[in-house]
Structure formats: C-alpha cells, structure tokens
Amino acid sequence: MNIREIIAKRAALELNDGEVANLGFGMPTQAVNYLPEGVSLIMHTENGAFGIGPKPKYEEANSDVSNAGSEPVTLPPGAAIMSLGTSLGAMRNGYIDVTILGALEVDQKGNIANWAVKRKGLWWPGIGGAMDLTHGTKKIVVTLTHTDKYGNSKIKKEVNLPKTGINCVKTIITEKAVFDVGDDILILREIAPGLTIEEIKEITEADFIVSEDFKEMEI
C-alpha cells in the first residue's frame, strides 16, 4: 500500500454513517473507497449537487455530470442539483457535517493552507470553495504527507503559506500519524506501525502532546 492509499484509508475512518460529506481533490476523494462496512454518506460536490453517486463506467459517463474536480459522477434517485451560489451558501451555513481536505501546510492552531504556491512572483492557482468549506463545515479533517520532498515538516507551529481557513481544523492525518487539534497544541492520537514518538518529534515542527488513548494507527 502506497502513502496516498494509507492516508486515504485512515481518513475514511473519520466518516460516520448518515453524514453529509464533502471530499476535496486528490487523496480525500479516495477515502470513499475505504469506507467501513455499514457506513453510507450523503456526498456533496461544491459545483452544485447533494447525494452524488459513484464514478460511472467509462461508456456510461456524461460530461454534464461531474464533481468539482471535473471527474464523472452519477446522480442516483434522490440526488439534488442546484446552482453554484446555492451550493456555496449551503457550505457556508453549516449544512456539511464533515470535509476532508488536502493541504500544503497545517499548524498547531488549526490553520490550513491549501490553495497557493508562489511561482514567477504570483500566488496561484486560487482559493476556490475550500474557503467556504473551512468557514461553515462542522468538522474539518486534513490529509497530507508528513514532510515535503526535502524532509521539512508540513505540520507547522504556524503556516507560512496564505491561509485558506483559520482555527478550523479538527484532525490531521498523514502517512505517519494522526493528530487532533487542541488548544494551540496538537494531540498525537495514533502513530504508524514501526515508528516511535521520538521519531515523530524529529519530523514534526508543531508542538504536540500524547493522547491518553494513544494507539497504533489503524491502516
């Protein structure tokens, strides 16, 4: 199992039966492939639908029916289609129970940066609907690799990149650990098999304490 699969599989355990869920691009969308048995969600896509279904077969795909990442989806009976403005309003006003988002950086205060890197003097590609989701969703789960390609921690004392949302993240999931966000400090809840707490400290810039129910990561 590769790093992305490990993160997606663990992220799926943060989803509960009956929740209204929005999954961000990349690793978050893969979480639905690992839902625990008996868990059924009402899936939302920010471009304007509640109750979307799974990806269709290639020959059954309809280019007019896609999620916010332009990936083909299905609209099973009961799905609701709406304007983008209505969808964004639902996101801002608490109709989404849980959102799993990818991130470039996250910090011990629960801030997330996931929309911009600076290239040729410009910040891009743009903030998109993640800003609305971080404002209005009850539970924000962040997925990302623990370090960048140079070995630098992506889990910061304070994010360096432009923020998407402030003090909003509840849980952080990497291929090496699971943290909850406490009061200006992280709480180490789980650790990947074969690793030690000291090894996690060496690759984590943020301050953290160890949970009383600390255990091995469920992957």
Image (tube, rainbow, N blue to C red):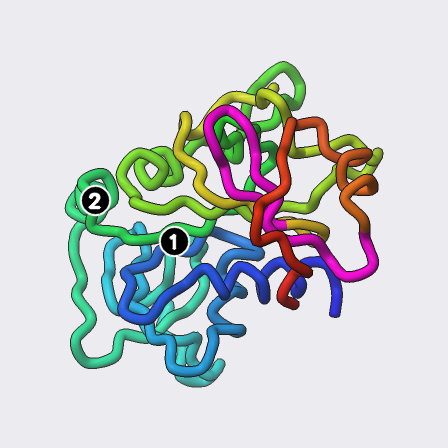
> Residue 80, image x and y in percent?
17, 66
The type of residue carrying mark 2 is Gly
Nearest to the observer: residue 41 or residue 52: 41
What residue is at 32 percent from the left and 71 percent from the top?
A: 17
Tell me: 8 left or right of 89.
right
Is 194 within the magenta? yes
| Total count of labels | 2
Is 187 within the magenta? yes
> Residue 84, image x and y in percent?
22, 47
Give the quarter of the image for residue 156: top right
Nearest to the observer: residue 55 or residue 35: 35
Magenta-drawn segment:
178-195
What residue is at 84 percent from the left and 34 percent from the top?
A: 150
Give the quarter of the image for residue 149: top right
Distance (Cα) linking label 1 and label 2: 19 Å
Which residue is tagged 2? 94
Q: Which badge, 1 or 2, is on the more N-terminal residue?
A: 1
Q: Which mark's residue is nearer the viewer, 1 or 2?
A: 2
Give the quarter of the image for residue 106: top right
Badge 1 crowding class, 10 Å Cα cut-off, few under 14, some 14 to 19, many 20 or more, is some
User: Split into 4 quadrants, where in the image is the C terminus?
Assistant: bottom right
User: Split into 4 quadrants, where in the image is the N terminus?
Assistant: bottom right
Q: Is residue 67 above or below residue 52?
A: above
Which residue is tagged 1? 68
Badge 2 crowding class, 10 Å Cα cut-off, few under 14, some 14 to 19, many 20 or more, is some
Q: Are marks 1 and 2 in contact (CB under 8 Å)?
A: no
What residue is at 45 percent from the left and 63 percent from the top?
A: 71
Tell me: 64 left or right of 6.
left
What residue is at 51 percent from the left and 56 percent from the top?
A: 28
Q: Residue furthest front?
A: 212
**Please, what secondary structure does the residue beneath circle 2 have?**
loop
